Amino acid sequence: MKEGNAELLISANTVNGTKGGLGSSYLANIVNDFTSDIKDRIVQPRKGATVTPAIKMVTQSRFNPNLDYKVFMVPALMVMVLTILCGFLPALNIVGEKEKGTIEQINVTPVSKFMFILAKVIPYWTIGFIALTSCFGIAAVVYGITPTGQLSTLYILALLYLFTISGFGLVISNYSETMQQAMFVMFFFMLVLILLSGLFTPINSMPQWAQVVTMFNPLKYFVQIMRAVYLKGSGFAELGVQISALTLFAVFFNSWAILSYRKKS
């Protein structure tokens, strides 16, 4: 009343953009109604009052101020690169040896199943880290996008994700008889996992049954990790749910891969 100006902060969680936008609009309407009430009860009765209270909304996005879609999409696309390199290719590895007949020579060696599986995935992990580092460089040079958080956090959690997705690829490889069969099965699963990872469509905007399915999608958790570290600067403490989920997936798929590999010695 003295200065003719008052500032009000509306802080809205817009992880779900639709709900966040609607909530902000409803609250803005409530404030507008309040200013109208002030006008009717206080300002107009004052003799010679000419100032009409009004509210001016100024929106500021906290983690992506310019609303640049590249800041949101590029980190998620890095996950797709890792998925193809360290999930799709290992799925073709063992089944390729089945077709060539070299798997029989490996089966009669004293190499354990654990060591055999580990030897199969280490080259792809190395390639995956090289590709991830290249993606970091390209994102910084071409798009000017650098992580707000620590690179070490990304590398450590990327290793956990590589455990998970390579184990998944090896499971498919163990149950496939030909490379063509492995390719089609892996392509089917990759398509479903990518569509339900939140890359293109926000998970909160999906039907309820689809949101339940995404709970069993490892891509979803690593996409959330990449975006959180890049945009928010999140650390291990803030990513406890995602880290726990990926750890369970890694143990499950790699144990399944080792047990399902039928080594005959």
Image (cartoon, grey):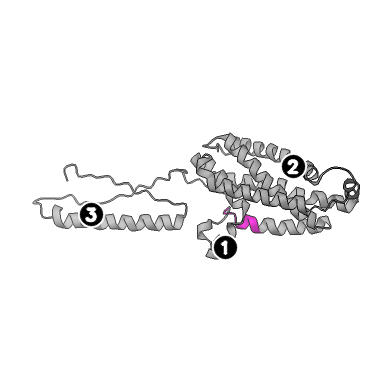
Residue 138 spot, x, y in % from top left = 63, 37
Q: Is residue 73 visible?
A: no
Q: Which numbered disc flags the more N-terminal residue, 2 or 1?
A: 2
Secondary structure at numbered mark 2: helix
The residue tagged 3 is 35
Q: Are marks 2 and 1 in contact (CB under 8 Å)?
A: no
Q: Estimate the spatial distance between the alpha carbons at disc 3 and disc 1, rounded to whole Å.
A: 43 Å
The residue tagged 1 is 210
Q: Estimate the spatial distance between the alpha carbons at disc 2 and disc 3, rounded to whole Å.
A: 62 Å
Q: Is residue 187 visible?
A: yes
Q: Is residue 211 left or right of residue 94?
A: left
The residue tagged 2 is 124
Farthest left residue in view: 47
Amino acid bearing label 3? Thr
Residue 161 spot, x, y in % from top left = 64, 45
Amino acid bearing label 2? Tyr
Q: Is residue 162 left or right of residue 107?
A: left
Residue at 43% x, 43% y: name it.
62
Instruction: Reply yes or no: does residue 203 show up in magenta.
Output: no
Q: Is residue 6 above or below residue 217?
A: above
Q: Which residues are magenta?
A: 192-198
Residue at 22% x, 57% y: name it.
36
Residue 174 location, quadrant: bottom right
Amino acid bearing label 1? Ala
Secondary structure at numbered mark 1: helix
**How dense is the environment of label 3, judged by Cα within 10 Å: few (below 14), some, or many (20 and up)?**
some
Residue 206 spot, x, y in % from top left = 53, 61
Q: Which numbered disc flags the more N-terminal residue, 3 or 1?
A: 3
